[in-house]
């Protein structure tokens, strides 16, 4: 699944935020944080794993999840490019409005 499609779901974003705050966590600890069944959370974790946003490691009987920093950097870079486009547009709008305001003074 595409990373941005995976990020479109609020539960998956909440899982990523949880992992960002807490580091690595077993699947059961992640599931305990949500008001849904463990299989439903497991499905969300599967989507995040297939999108490359999280990594999973098996330790004894547990699956331990953590963020995939490389994938998160890709998302951050994309968001940064989009932010720069909007900053340029807003700067241009600000300059235009200032020039219009200067021309509308008392005369």
Image (cartoon, grey):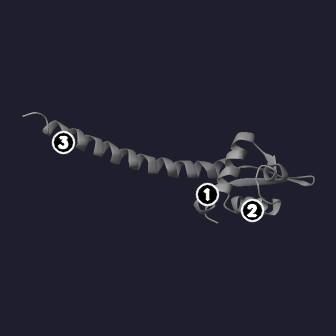
Of residues 54 and 25, which is closer to you in this image? 25
> What distance separates the C-alpha of mark 1 from that of mark 2?
13 Å
Q: Which residue is mark 2?
A: 46
Q: Which residue is mark 3?
A: 100
Give the percent coordinates (x, y) of residue 98.
23, 38
In this view, the mark in front (1 or 3): 3
Element type at mark 2: helix
Residue at the far left: name it: 107
In this view, the mark in front (3 or 2): 3
Q: Is residue 71 left or right of residue 39?
A: left
Residue at the spot 49% in from the left edge and 47% down from the top edge: 80
Number of other residues with Cα within 10 Å of mark 3, as a class: few under 14, some 14 to 19, many 20 or more? few
Q: Earlier in the sequence, mark 1 or mark 3?
A: 1
Residue at the spot 34% in from the left edge and 45% down from the top edge: 90
Q: Earlier in the sequence, mark 3 or mark 2?
A: 2
Number of other residues with Cα within 10 Å of mark 1, as a class: few under 14, some 14 to 19, many 20 or more? some
> What distance separates the C-alpha of mark 3 from that of mark 2?
53 Å
Q: Is residue 62 left or right of residue 34?
A: right
Q: Which residue is mark 1?
A: 7
Residue at the far top: name it: 106
Q: Earlier in the sequence, mark 1 or mark 2?
A: 1
Give the percent coordinates (x, y) of residue 10.
63, 56
- Quadrant occupied by the N terminus: bottom right
* Rendered view: 12 above or below 84: below
Of residues 71 and 94, which is closer to you in this image? 94
Residue at the spot 59% in from the left edge and 59% down from the top edge: 8
Q: Is residue 68 visible?
A: no
- Quadrant occupied by the C terminus: top left
Q: Is residue 44 visible?
A: yes
Residue at the spot 39% in from the left edge and 49% down from the top edge: 85
Give the percent coordinates (x, y) of residue 65.
78, 51
């Amino acid at each position: 699944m595409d990373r941005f499609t995976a990020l479109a779901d609020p539960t998956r974003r909440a899982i990523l935020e949880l992992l960002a705050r807490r580091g690595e966590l077993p699947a059961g600890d992640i599931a305990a944080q949500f008001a849904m069944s463990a299989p439903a959370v497991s499905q969300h974790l599967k989507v995040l794993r297939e999108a490359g946003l999280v990594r999973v490691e098996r330790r004894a009987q547990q699956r331990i999840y953590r963020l995939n920093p490389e994938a998160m950097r890709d998302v951050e870079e994309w968001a940064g490019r989009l932010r720069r486009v909007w900053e340029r547009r807003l700067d241009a709008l600000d300059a235009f409005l200032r020039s219009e305001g200067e021309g509308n003074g008392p005369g």
